[in-house]
Structure formats: C-alpha cells, structure tokens
Image: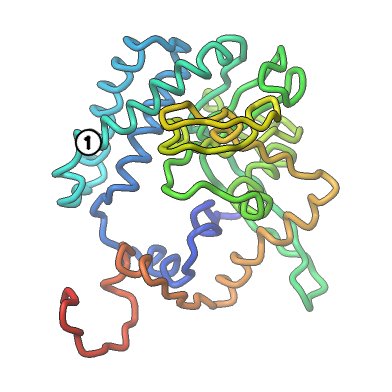
Amino acid sequence: MPDIEYHSGEITRPCPKNIQLRQEGKFNPEMQTAMYRGAFASYLMEYLHGANEWDDDAVAAAGVLAIQKITDDIEKEGRELSDTVENSREDIHSEVLWCIIEYARRLGPMFKQCKFIGCELPCRVTVSVTPTGKRRPKKINFASHTDLLFRDPLNVFGQGKNRLCLWDFKFTKDSPTWDYLTRQPQLLLYFVCGLEGSFLLDDMWIEFNEAPALAWCHLPHLKPFKRRTTCTDDDGVTTEYVKGNARPLKNVVRWCNYRIDRLDDIKFELCQRPLMYEAGFYPMIPDAIGCHLCESREWCPRFDLSHLEGDSP
C-alpha cells in the first residue's frame, strides 16, 4: 500500500483547514472534555467486552483499569488535561459509568450469546477512484480503528444469523438523524473495509470480505427520558413514556445497513476530500462554536475585529 493514509477523522472533521493544520503538527495537545469522555468510555468498553462479564463488579473493575489506562496515555503522549477536565474528572467518570452500567444490564446478556472479535481494531482499505474530469484511476488509502467487532451466531440483534457486526460508540450531545446516518463518512468507511479491506487481529491483517451490520451506538441515550414522551417501542408499538423510563434500545443502537449496490458511489464520495487535499485545497469553514473549541485555532488565519464588550480576549 502507498505510504499516505487518510484516517477517518480527516474525512469527518467539518473544517478542512483544521485537517491541514493538524497534518502540519499545529494543534494544542490539551485534552478537552469530549475527548476525555470518549476515551474513558472506549477503554471501559474494551475491558468489558474483552472479559465478557457484565455485572456491576465487572463494570467497577473496568472503570479502575480505564482510568489508569487514560492516565498512562496522557503521560505517554505528552498531553495535558484542560482546566475544565481537571476540575470535573469525577463528574465525567460518574456520568460515563452510569451509562455503561445500563449498557451492561440491557445488552450484556445479548453479548453473552455473541462471539467477540475485538475492540479498537485497526482497519485499512485502498480505494481506486477516477477523479472527475480525469481518465486514469487514482488509489486512495484509508485507515481507522473500529470500536467493536463481533459475530452474532444466534441473531440476537436481529441483523441476520452469524452476521458480522461493527459498532461505533458515540458520546455526543446530539443524537444523529437518519438523514445524517445514511451519509455518515466514518460508518461508510467501515462498510467498505468489511467488504474490501482488512482488520488487524493478533498481529495479522485479516480480510472478512463481507458487508458488516453497522451501528451508531449512542451511549447518552442509555440515560432515561427526562420528560413525558410518546414514541414507538422496540416492537414498533406507539408507547407513552414518563420521566425516568428507559429509552427503547432502538434509540441507543442505530443500525445502518448500507446497500452493496451503492458501493461504487460510496467509494467515490469517500475519496472526494482526500482528492481535494492532494490538490492543495483546505478551505476554512468557520463555525460559531467549533472555532472556539478548535485545537488549532492559535495557528488558523484570522482577520481580527475589535473585541466587543463582554467578549473574552
């Protein structure tokens, strides 16, 4: 494979200028809340799924290991915690652990019937695409890590007997709409990896050559409803839920079965950003909130206004 690989983050981050600055090493290594929360949840899942034990003691033990792991990683990578994270670590741990306890209670018995393959598995695929206006195809390399890969021999998740399943854990504030999931680049990349790419298992690159059943696992929806809500339950029955009721699992595990007959279109769209980068285009796409949170904002071009009263300098 060629040397250059595009990670999934480089096709999902909203601002290409951020991608360019990160490629140049121009970013603040300080770990913000979202990154810390996501890393803690990811390590918890890795330990729990690896052990395949789901009682409260197993979750507590995994929590201790996850905290130690993330602490070691911060030191190894030379990162620092932001003041916000430093002052709220216990709250972050409590919030995530509460959701993981619910995950274990509701999904653990189902995973007991599945075959665990791995967590945080590297994956890669090479896609050949003919750029618009060109005659010769170009090869683009992609790489990522999968949060969870498993087989479902008994079809307990309803996606087919012995189906290869790939889940991506998310702890974002906003839940995804169907219009977003049907176009989500990271999940589309995993789809192509399952069909044409390979996964690193026990130091060997393994090809599955099959379409995985993909799911966006929205961990915050393991929290109960905050108010009276009417929606369909997991059986499709319209149900009224009250404050404190658990949400249907279909609101937590959002299945995304992409169509194999759209594979060429998917690969074409995945390659658009890398082709743009290789042509030297990294347009700035400012965002009202994102710019303030961006780890590369110190190096990003700015066209200063006078500070308004009340603004932070």
Q: x, y percentage for residue 239? A: 61, 30
Q: Is residue 279 left or right of residue 267?
A: left
Indicate whether 193 appears above or below 6.
Answer: above
Q: x, y percentage for residue 94? A: 26, 30
Quadrant of residue 20 within the rendered picture:
bottom left
* Residue appearing at x 33%, y 64% in the figure: 294
Secondary structure under the numbered disc 1 in the rendered image: helix
**Crowd band around label 1 with a 10 angstrom C-alpha radius: few (<14), some (14–19), many (20+):** few
Indicate whether 84 appears above or below 76.
Answer: below
Residue most extreme to the right: 261
Q: Is residue 29 left or right of residue 119?
A: left
* Residue appearing at x 14%, y 44% in the figure: 87
The coloring applied to the image is rainbow
Q: Nearer the viewer, residue 270 or 156?
A: 156
Q: x, y percentage for residue 222? A: 45, 30
Indicate whether 261 appears above or below 312.
Answer: above
Quadrant of residue 207 within the rendered picture:
top right
Q: Is residue 102 left or right of residue 107?
A: left
- Quarter of the picture containing the C terminus is bottom left
For label 1, the residue is 91
Q: Amino acid at mark 1?
A: Asp
Q: Nearer the viewer, residue 94 or 59?
A: 94
Count of numbered marks: 1
Q: x, y percentage for residue 159? A: 73, 26
Q: Nearer the viewer, residue 2 or 114?
A: 114
Indicate whether 32 appears above or below 159.
Answer: below
* Residue appearing at x 19%, y 77% in the figure: 311
* Residue appearing at x 43%, y 25% in the figure: 46
